[in-house]
Image (cartoon, rainbow, N blue to C red):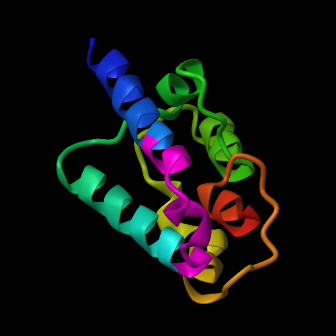
Amino acid sequence: MAERDERDADRFFEDLAEATDVARRAPTRLKSRIYSALMLDAAASGPLRPLGACERAGHVLCVWEKLARVAAAGTLDEFNYCRVCHARVIGERVERAPLAWRGCPYADFQKG
């Protein structure tokens, strides 16, 4: 049930962002920093959703999350890989950074 509530909340905020032009005009560095802050807040409130559950819910895992999921065999499944990824560091510091990882939110911010 909680997973459904999270999907509903995600959809609500996605619809809200699409309804306003602000999401497209915000600097990509700001989007990256806000995402990082939200992820830190989520991690502070408890363990993150396991990668397998994220994938089953329809979220695309980035190449590093997929690799970690296979290599670690679930032992670090709730670890926030974005915290140690170079895409986060570049995304927070470079406007329109040349990031192209499929499933990476920081790369997605750079697209538009």
Residue 76 appearing in the image: no
Work out which residue is located at the far bottom of the displayed protein and give it.
93
Magenta residues, start to end: 16-29
In this view, which residue lies farthest toward the front? Answer: 20
Residue 26 in magenta stretch = yes
Residues 1 and 17: in front is: 17
Quarter holding the N terminus is top left
Asked if residue 79 lies left or right of residue 96, the reply is left
Quarter of the picture holding the C terminus? bottom right
Where residue 10 sits, quadrant-wise, is: top left
Q: Nearer the viewer, residue 16 or 78?
A: 16
* Front-most of residues 107 and 81: 107
The answer to whether one can see residue 7 in this image is yes
For the point 48% across and 37% down, the residue is 15
Q: Is residue 101 above or below residue 98?
A: above
Residue 51 picture location, percent across and down: 52, 34
**Chief SS of the magenta region:** helix
Residue 93 lies within the magenta run: no
Residue at x-position 44% and y-position 62%: 35
Q: Which of 14 and 69 is in front in this view?
A: 14
Number of numbered discs present? 0
Q: Which residue is drawn at 43% across and 44% down?
A: 16
Residue 105 image point, x, y percent:
61, 55
What x and y, as percent, mark residue 92? 55, 81
Which residue sits furthest left?
Answer: 45
* Residue positioned 65% across, 40% down in the render: 61
Horizontally, residue 36 falls left or right of residue 19, namely left
Give residue 96's position: percent from left, percent from top.
Answer: 74, 79
